[in-house]
Image (spheres, rainbow, N blue to C red):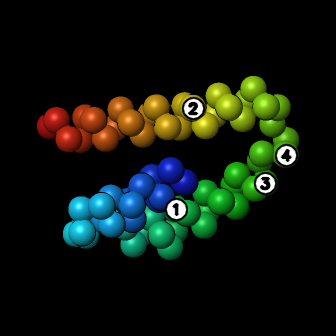
Amino acid sequence: LFINGLLHPLSSLVSASYSPGTISGVFLYVPLGFLALKRIIPELSVGQRNTGITAGILIHLVVVVLALTI
C-alpha cells in the first residue's frame, strides 16, 4: 500500500491530471504504510526486508501492467 500511495500522486504529477486514488494514497496509504514500515523494519533481517520490498514493487508492477492492458 505504501508504494501504491506514493505512485498515485506521482502519476498525477507526470500526467498533469487527477489519478484515481491520489487523495486516499496521500492521506491514508502513505501514512499507514510509513507507520507499518517503521514498526516492522527493525524486526526484519536484511534479506527479509529486501524480499518484502522487491515483492511489493513487483506485485504493484504486475497490477499496473494488467490495468493498462485491459
Task: Answer above or below: position of 14 versus 67.
Answer: below
The image quarter containing residue 19 is bottom left
Query: Looking at the image, do the residues carrying marks 3 and 4 touch, with CB atoms under 8 Å apart?
Result: yes
Give whichever of 16, 69 is nearer the camera. 16
Q: Earlier in the sequence, mark 3 or mark 2?
A: 3
Residue tagged by mark 4? 42
Residue tagged by mark 3? 39
SS at mark 2 in the image = helix
Q: Earlier in the sequence, mark 4 or mark 2?
A: 4
Q: Is residue 2 left or right of residue 50?
A: left
The image quarter containing residue 45 is top right
Marks 3 and 4, how far apart at CA: 7 Å
Query: Looking at the image, do the residues carrying marks 2 and 1 touch, with CB atoms under 8 Å apart?
Result: no
The three-letter amino acid code for the residue at tag 2 is: Thr
Q: Earlier in the sequence, mark 4 or mark 1?
A: 1
The three-letter amino acid code for the residue at tag 4 is: Pro
Task: Answer above or below: position of 44 versus 17.
Answer: above
* Rendered-image quadrant of the C terminus: top left
At which x and y percent is residue 16? 24, 69
Query: Looking at the image, do the residues carrying marks 4 and 1 touch, with CB atoms under 8 Å apart?
Result: no
Residue tagged by mark 2? 54
Task: Answer above or below: position of 10 versus 58.
Answer: below
Q: Is residue 21 left or right of residue 29?
A: left
Q: Earlier in the sequence, mark 3 or mark 1?
A: 1
SS at mark 1 in the image = helix
Number of numbered discs: 4
Q: Earlier in the sequence, mark 2 or mark 1?
A: 1
The three-letter amino acid code for the residue at tag 1 is: Tyr
